[in-house]
Each structure stands twice: as C-alpha cells, then as structure tokens.
Image (cartoon, rainbow, N blue to C red):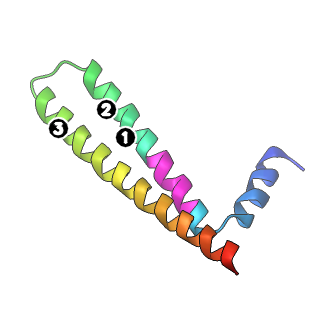
Amino acid sequence: MTSSMNQQAAASQKSRAEQETENEANRLREQVEAALSAVAQRSPDEADALQTAADRIERAARDLADALRELAQQRRATEES
C-alpha cells in the first residue's frame, strides 16, 4: 500500500469527532502561521491585520476546544458502553 492509501484507510477509521478535532487543530495552526506572517509585515494597515489575526486565532482556538470536549464526551460514552 502507498502512503496515500494508508492515510485514507486511517482516515476512514476515524470518528466524525476525531476528524473534526483534527480539522480544527489544523485550522488553528494555519491561523497562527498567518498571524506570524502578519507580525513580520510592516504596512499602513498593520494594526488592523494584527487585530484580525487575533480574532481569527481566538475563534479557531474556541472551535478546537469545543471539538476536543465533544471528542472526550464521545470517548467517555464509548467506555461506558
């Protein structure tokens, strides 16, 4: 099997909550990278770009926290069954 096929097989075995958690973690990572890029830029609208980056990171972090809680709840329910 190729690496791509292995990844697809592993992805098909993940629950929806696990996939959502991974997606949210990746989104947060992307937002942090974008923020670091905004920090490095010097432009007239720099303050607005930094504020926007902060807002996006805040939302992405909140979404990841919610996804993690949902995953934890799902795993607890599985353990109890």
Q: Disc 3 on helix, strand or loop?
A: helix
Callout 2 amino acid: Ala
Label 1 to label 3, Cα distance in Å?
12 Å
Rendered-image quadrant of the C terminus: bottom right
For image coordinates 45% across by 40% down, the residue present is: 29
Q: Residues within 10 Å of mark 1 (few under 14, many from 20)?
A: many
Quickly name the residue at label 2: 35
Disc 1 target residue: 31
Taking the image as shown, residue 3 lies to the left or right of residue 12, namely right
Do the numbered discs 1 and 2 sit on residues whose CB atoms are within 8 Å?
A: yes
Nearer the N terminus, badge 3 or badge 2?
2
Q: Is mark 1 on a helix, strand or loop?
A: helix
- Mark on residue 51? 3
Looking at the picture, does residue 44 appear above or below residue 33?
Answer: above
Question: In the image shown, does 76 or 26 lie closer to the viewer?
Answer: 76
**What's the residue at 55%, 64% (across, down)?**
71
Label 2, residues with CA under 10 Å away: few <14, some 14-19, many ≥20: many
Mark 3, other Cα within 10 Å: few <14 / some 14–19 / many ≥20? few
Q: Give the range drawn in magenta.
A: 19-27
The residue that appears at 68% across and 64% down in the rendered structure is 14
Q: What residue type is labelled 3?
A: Gln
Looking at the image, is 15 positioned above or below residue 33? below
